[in-house]
Image (cartoon, grey):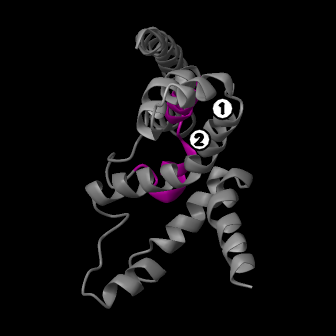
Amino acid sequence: WREIQFRRFFRVLFLLPMMTTPVIISALWRTILNESLGPVNNILGFFGVTPPWLTDSGWAIGSVMLVQVWVWTPFMFLLLLAGLISLPREPFLAAEIDGAGPIRTFLNVTFPLMAPISIGAIMLRLIAASKIMATPFVLTSGGPGTATETSSYYIYIRGLKDFNIGYASSLSIIYLVIMILLLTILAKVLIRI
């Protein structure tokens, strides 16, 4: 019975973010982190701590990062697990025959074999992180002030809220060029390592 309950908890906690849109996840977290009605501050209130999750700039950035980590961790784990499963067995058998322990096997066999998969996962995550818009929009509306305003959200504000379409489109093109250059340079650096 406990194993079944643990599996259900695991599915809800880790697989829910992969099957739900970022807007729904952000609305859920906005409710959880609500300073007056949220369950997190109700629980922390017993210890005399009630952080301003969404109204203080430092806490708001941390809240957006917490939500993003919670959303993307299952996907990254699945990607890296698929990479681990697909590794060839021969290098591990050779390391075992040579008498390598688990740490040496990880450092000299698993880590180098996982490098291309890890680089691909890092690049996918950086691309997704560069276009974060829904989480700050729903969670904090870019606030307090402009503390959680991402570049995508700024382009959205300039283009669709201020209706300055030309400026927003030029920002989008410049942002695209900058991201292509940065990701290309980063991929070259990571491949050399």
Taken as a whole, is the magenta stretch helix, strand or loop?
helix
Q: Nearer the viewer, residue 69 or 2?
A: 2
122 drawn magenta: yes
The answer to whether the residue labelled 2 contacts the one labelled 1, judged by CB atoms less than 8 Å apart, is no
Q: Position of residue 188 (x, y in %)?
A: 45, 8
Task: Name the residue: 50% across, 55% down.
Answer: 67
Q: Which residue is mark 1?
A: 83
Callout 1 crowding tier (Cα within 10 Å): few <14, some 14–19, many ≥20: some
For this view, does 33 lie left or right of residue 59?
Answer: right
- Under mark 2, the amino acid is Met
Q: Which residue is mark 2?
A: 76
Q: Does residue 123 show up?
A: no
Per the rendering, the mark at residue 41 is: none
User: Which residues lie in the magenta part?
Assistant: 117-142
Say which quadrant the N terminus sits in: bottom right
Q: Position of residue 167 (x, y in %)?
A: 48, 20
- Under mark 1, the amino acid is Gly
